[in-house]
Every structure is written in structure tokens, then in C-alpha cells.
Amino acid sequence: MKILHILNDGPADLPERIIAVHREQHDVRVVDLTQKDLSYDALIDDIFSSDKVISW
């Protein structure tokens, strides 16, 4: 399963622990919205190509 985690406020302890568990069994991508070089076109592509999207 492809899972996309979107971090709205940057990395935090709980999301990082859950992401680590998801990475053990799934294809995981993490997007940090606080990054300055963020491509919103790529983000939209990631959202629609993922089976599950989790926003933190």
C-alpha cells in the first residue's frame, strides 16, 4: 500500500513513530509543508497516486 504522510507543522514525535511503523510494511512518502522548496504539483500527484493520505 502506498501511504502519503503530510506534515503541516514539520516533524513531531508521534507522526515520526507512526511513519516508522508504516515503513516496515508499506511504501511510505512524507511531505513536510514547512519546506521552502515544495512543489505543489508534485504534492497533488502524490496525493492522487497514494492509497492512503494522512495529514498531521
Image (cartoon, rainbow, N blue to C red):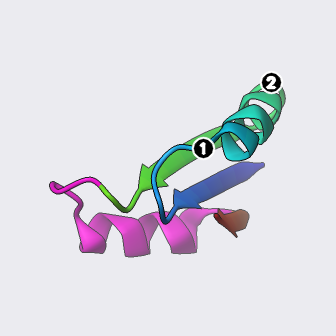
Picture layout, residue 24 above or below residue 35: above
Q: Name the mark nearer the viewer: 2 or 1.
A: 1
Question: Percent position (x, y) of residue 18?
Answer: 79, 40
Q: Quadrant of the C terminus?
A: bottom right
| Residue 50 picture location, percent across and down | 63, 62
Q: Secondary structure at mark 2?
A: loop
12 to the left or right of 25: left
- What is the crowding at mark 1: few (fewer than 14 residues within 10 Å), some, or many (at least 20)? few
Task: Identify the amino acid type marked 2.
Answer: Glu
| Extreme-top residue of the structure | 24
The answer to which image quadrant residue 19 occupies is top right
Say whether disc 2 or disc 1 marks the residue closer to the N-terminus: 1
Query: Vertical placement of 52 versus 21: above or below?
Result: below
Drawn side of residue 2 relative to residue 32, left or right: right
Q: Is 41 included in the stretch rendered in magenta?
A: yes
Q: Secondary structure at mark 1?
A: loop
Distance from the alpha carbon under mark 2 to that under mark 1: 19 Å
* Residues in magenta, as a range: 35-50
| Residue shown at the point (52%, 47%) measured from the top left | 30
Identify the amino acid type marked 1.
Ala
Residue 38 x %, y %: 23, 60
Residue beneath the point at 61% across and 55% down:
5
Residue at 69% across, 65% down: 54
Residue at 45% over, 51% down = 10
Which residue is under mark 1?
12
Q: Which mark is residue 24?
A: 2
Q: Is residue 21 magenta?
A: no
